[in-house]
Amino acid sequence: MACPTVQMVSIFTVILVMLCASQVYWFWRASVLIRRTVSTKSARLALGGAALGAFLLTLAYNAGWVGGKGTHVRLMPADVLLGAPFSWWLAGSLAAALLLALFWIAVWLVRAPIRIARSLAARAPEIESPARRVFLHRAANGVAAAPFVAGVYGAFHGRLNLETPRQPILLPRLPKAFEGFRIAQLSDFHIGPFMTQEQIRKYVVIANALKPDLTVVTGDFITWDPATQRAVVEALSGLAAPFGIFGCLGNHDAWAGVQGSITRLFQQAGIRILRHERVSIATQGEALNLMGIDYTSRLPMGPSNAGLVTQYLEGAGGLIDRGRVNILLSHNPNTFDRAAELGIELSLAGHTHGGQVALEFISPEIAPSRLVTPYVAGLFQKPGGQLYVNRGIGTVGAPIRLGAPPEITLFELKRG
């Protein structure tokens, strides 16, 4: 088996090469279009220069080379004019180039047997009719346009189409006092211009309206900018549940270096972040054991590979209470295999965004998150435990969701 480091480097290298190649392709297509539609050389140069200048400006803004800004926690004009269009273009252009490549490969595969048969029969090659050529090029243009149209839909609807699924959880050892106990889970906030402080406050109101007994938040409160941590804590400070608000930290919290500071801010807001800790949730003389761990991964990713481990849940055995039902808050769903081995009855995770762009209506395997985990979204069961992977409410990269709507989950614990 290949080393995980080699695998991840290979995956990201391939993605980067494909992204660069797609940009070269689309610039070539644009130059061809300009030559066909603009008659004078000076006008062509002006139009081409304007298009290249706009691309370089949005690239410089999004890379942080110009603007001198941190991450906004409310939507600003620059985010609308420079941020969103650039991420929409990168995602759409890459997908469109890949689809076009697949389209023409399919056309070639269909034509190849006919050409081979005609060649073997010593017949002249078939001359393609103008009508067929026009049809193929129109079909190719439709294929190329689809990702851009889908991106607009994902930005304006899919990203905000919040779901609040009710998920029963059967636990054989559940104490009678916790029959019907309700837990709300929110995850992957990624506060920023497209998941603003005000939007998170609205989701807090929705979560509270579910009337949970306990609320958990499972990491990735920020994305990259440490300066946004106070804003997300303030937005989440309105969460309310009679048995309290608890959480764990995510990979972006670790990569931004805010694990200690954001934990203290949450503590001041009455929210307890469990960092390799446990807490007893008790009522009527009976209790559950709630555990939380920092983000860990066996895949080398992010700045300085923060959270990199050789074994998941190493040292977590001391957090388990064998006499009670154990519930684990772990941002990374990949800890589930080890959690089930340890007999942890329920794990709650996030991290994947449900794939963020998931085409599972075509195939269950078409979700980017499957590159790093088999546990993309929803409920999973295996001997020893259960896992629920929350799709989260925020986005990373392009502010787009397709086939993976944001969610706030309400669990109802039942004996069974």
Image (tube, rainbow, N blue to C red):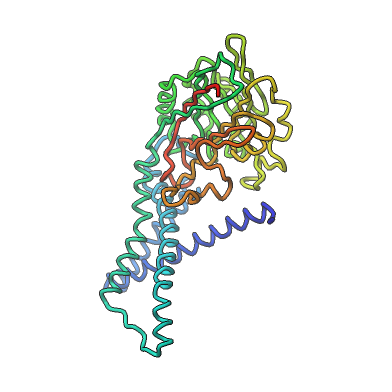
Does residue 395 appear left or right of residue 371 in this picture?
A: left
The spot of residue 332 in percent (x, y) is 60, 38
Classify 237 as above or below 401.
above
Q: Residue lying furthest bottom in this view?
A: 122
Question: Residue at coordinates 38% horizontally, 42% vertically from top-left?
Answer: 158
**Camera-side residue of 412 and 141:** 412
Question: Residue at coordinates 61% horizontally, 19% vertically from top-left?
Answer: 288
Question: Residue at coordinates 46% horizontally, 63% vertically from top-left?
Answer: 22
**Camera-side residue of 211 and 159:** 211
Q: Quadrant of residue 39?
A: bottom left
- The number of numbered badges drawn on the structure is 0
Q: Quadrant of the N terminus?
A: bottom right
Q: Quadrant of the C terminus?
A: top right
The spot of residue 80 in percent (x, y) is 37, 44
Does residue 319 appear left or right of residue 233 in this picture?
A: right
**Camera-side residue of 366 and 94:** 366
Q: Residue lying furthest front in this view?
A: 416
Residue 190 appears anywhere in the view? no
The spot of residue 123 in percent (x, y) is 37, 89
**Camera-side residue of 317 and 190:** 317
The spot of residue 208 in percent (x, y) is 44, 21
Residue 120 appears anywhere in the view? yes
